[in-house]
Amino acid sequence: MFYRENGQFKTSYRADGQIFPIRQDQIAMALLLLIALVGVPLFASEYLFRAILIPFLILSLAALGLNVLVGYCGQISLGTGAFMAVGAYAAYNFHVRIEGMPLIASLLLGGLCSTLVGVLFGIPSLRIKGLYLAVATLAAQFFCDWAFLRIKWFTNDSPSGNVSVSGLQLLGCSIESPVQKYLFCLGFVLVFALLTKNLVRSAIGREWMAMRDMDVAAAVIGIRPVYAKLSAFAVSSFIVGVAGALWGFVHLSSWEPAAFSIDRSFQLLFMVIIGGLGSVMGSFFGAAFIIILPIVLGQIPHWFGIPMQTETASHLEFMIFGALIVFFLIVEPHGIARLWSTAKEKLRLWPFPH
């Protein structure tokens, strides 16, 4: 009864092409932003910031970048963790080697370096696809793991391989408290989500989706596969690289190559698949699912007073987590975003049966 388009007329192309054409969606998004910008900083605890909110924002950004490549362009990638590592270590070197380098410039330059590496490893996509492309991007993961572990220049000659950053500042303001880090990450996520949403609705976004649906037919109608695929790798790697820099600078503060291992690549791929391929909102749903579910599963024995050893609880968590992923993929292979869209479609017709 409250989710209707009756009386909401579009009188221009600009109004018809809005990201949220329904007024109720606009109000809901405004309230959500108000809660995120004002309510959460006022009432959330330090644990909530450090364990859930900041990782959620950064991994949502990384999943958003991967969704551009996998969901919109149809190019399978298993090297996302490597591109995050390139962004993190490149931003670190810019930050410590260049005196007075602004923080945002370091992060964006780290994303630019990740773009170059992503395009380099995206060149095989011009000849191969599917499982073979996944193996080619997996090579990027192993190569970057070896490079950041063995080449000491990347870690500023650190003997242990660990690097650390401290004293982050933005326009003279310190970024040290959990609230400040949360707002800093939130600003990046909002900007990149808006840019990505508009990008996938543009001409290049339609080219990506044409390549995803049928690359031969896309080439026949005049779409250049070289430009479409490499641009998808470039945009995806840039966003993922910035997310990797944020993960190292803001969330970890001190990290080693293991922080961006192949497990991180699979985790991000699961986020995109579960959240919804080819959906900006699905990236956020997938990140929330992956981050919150293990915490909830780990607390269930304590809630019900079930005595359980730490090792058993850890193994049970992995078993339940894997079973839920398989079950969810069978029930709704298009992800949580599709469930959300279906619920909205039914809500627009409720209570009428048709």
Image (cartoon, rainbow, N blue to C red):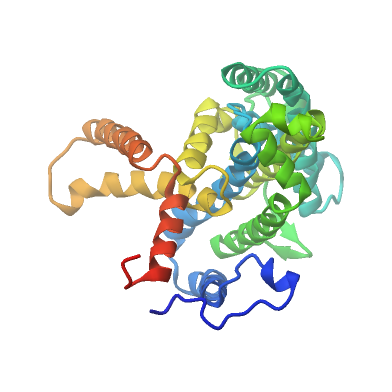
Residue drawn at x 55%, y 31% as measured from the top left: 265
Q: Can you tell which quarter of the image residue 204 is in?
A: top right
x then y, percent, for residue 142: 62, 18
Front in this rendered view, residue 263 or 181: 263
Q: Is residue 244 above or below residue 55?
A: above
* Residue 88 visible, this angle: no
> In the figure, is residue 121 to the left or right of 179?
right
Work out which residue is located at the far front of the displayed protein and give it.
354
The image position of residue 218, as x and y in percent, is: 73, 33
Image position of 90 (left or right of 28)? right
For the C terminus, the quadrant is: bottom left
Residue at point 48%, 54% (across, down): 50
Residue depicted at 66% across the width and 62% down the height: 187
Residue 158: x %, y % from top left: 69, 27
Position of 32 compared to 311: left or right? right
Quadrant, the N terminus: bottom left
35 in relation to 112, above or below: below
Q: Residue at x 54, y 60 (%)?
A: 178
The image position of residue 297, as x and y in percent, is 28, 45
Q: Quadrant of residue 194?
A: bottom right
